[in-house]
Image: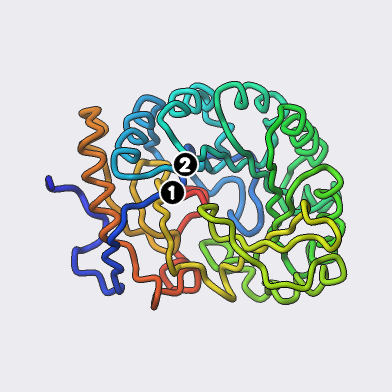
Amino acid sequence: MRALPVLQPARSARPLAAPSTPPRAVRLSLTDRCDLACIYCRPHKHDGYLERRLSTDEWRVLVHGLVGAGVRRVRITGGEPLLFPGVVDFVAAIADLGLEDLAITTNATRLERLAAPLRAAGLHRINVSLDTLDSQRFFRITRGGNLAQVLRGIDAAVAAGFDPIKLNTVVVRGENDDEVEAIARFAWERGLVPRFLEVMPIGDGQTLSDRMVPFSEIRARLEHLLEPVDPAREADRGPARYVARRGHAHQRVGFITGTTDTFCRGCDRLRVASDGTLRPCLATNDGVSPTLALARRDADLVTDAVHAAWEMKPDGEVWKGCTEETAREVSIRQIGG
């Protein structure tokens, strides 16, 4: 393997997993730019952006290298990925690479116009961040967002034929925790899958640690609506665990417990920050930069960088993910959540 720039010393204090299998999933932070500033993600709208971000052509080379390393599931994130000027062309460029899954997570502010083109380009699935159904609360939580604009985006995604569409709600005590049932019913009525996330102490999320609502409490608010069974994960679909709605087997609710019950064990996911850095874990800034590979447009060298980054994967048996001290230094907006 050729020498590659590593963003942490080779002898890390973190316990390493030495994975025997390659990464199967990747989250691409296509841009660190965002038109919102949600309270659990950013301190304000003027917290600065990276000076260097990848071009569409560089992203294409990088994805070819990821596929060469074994990746088969790609989720495009941000920042807000629909702010990336060439997002539809990028989706079209990687849709024919034999991926098992190609999805995007968006705040939906631009989804009304882009849902149909993204579907035509080959995008499989969409997740939408939606933390409240109250327009004033939405404005406050997002620091200026327009709820009606987001709801139109969701309607456009439904009309474009995306299925499933998942709604991601970060539950914050004293902010939106009284809306859990209303959001679940809103989603079910539209054929969507509601998912509720614990606040994770990553980056600015640490300022809300005392307002974190645990999974047990979120589920208790929905208990009368759900089947009395333990939540279960979908195969190859990330850390969320699901429970069916009582009497409606086709309707589900998901829970993501990054704080009270970390999901590091068995993680097969790599992340790519918006500057191209390959990161093996959400909760650290460790990584490998593929700058040379991208400058040469060398997908094979990207594959080498992926292998090098994967060797830095923390051991999920002892590593506690987002609760580790290193998580406080991570920017969700740059690494893609």
Q: Is residue 52 above or below residue 308?
A: above
The residue under label 1 is which amino acid type?
A: Ala
Q: What residue lies at 39% left-to-right and 78% top-to-bottom? A: 318
Question: In x, y percent, where is residue 300?
Answer: 21, 36
Q: What residue lies at 78% left-to-right and 53% top-to-bottom? A: 251
In the shown orientation, is residue 117 left or right of residue 179? left
Question: In x, y percent, where is residue 234?
Answer: 58, 57
Q: Which residue is mark 2?
A: 74
Q: Secondary structure at mark 1?
A: strand
Q: Is residue 105 above or below residue 260?
A: above
Q: Which residue is mark 1?
A: 25
Q: How many marks?
A: 2
Q: Earlier in the sequence, mark 2 or mark 1?
A: 1
Q: Nearer the viewer, residue 60 or 247?
A: 247
Q: What residue lies at 71% left-to-right and 76% top-to-bottom? A: 216
Q: Secondary structure at mark 2?
A: strand
Q: Nearer the viewer, residue 26 or 198?
A: 26
Q: Quadrant of residue 35?
A: top right
Question: In x, y percent, where is residue 210?
Answer: 66, 76
* Residues at discs 2 and 1 in contact (Cβ within 8 Å): yes
Q: Is residue 72 above or below residue 119?
A: below
Q: Nearer the viewer, residue 245 or 9?
A: 245
The residue under label 2 is which amino acid type?
A: Val
**Marker disc for residue 54:** none
Q: What residue lies at 71% left-to-right and 49% top-to-bottom? A: 167
In the shown orientation, is residue 201 left or right of residue 164? left
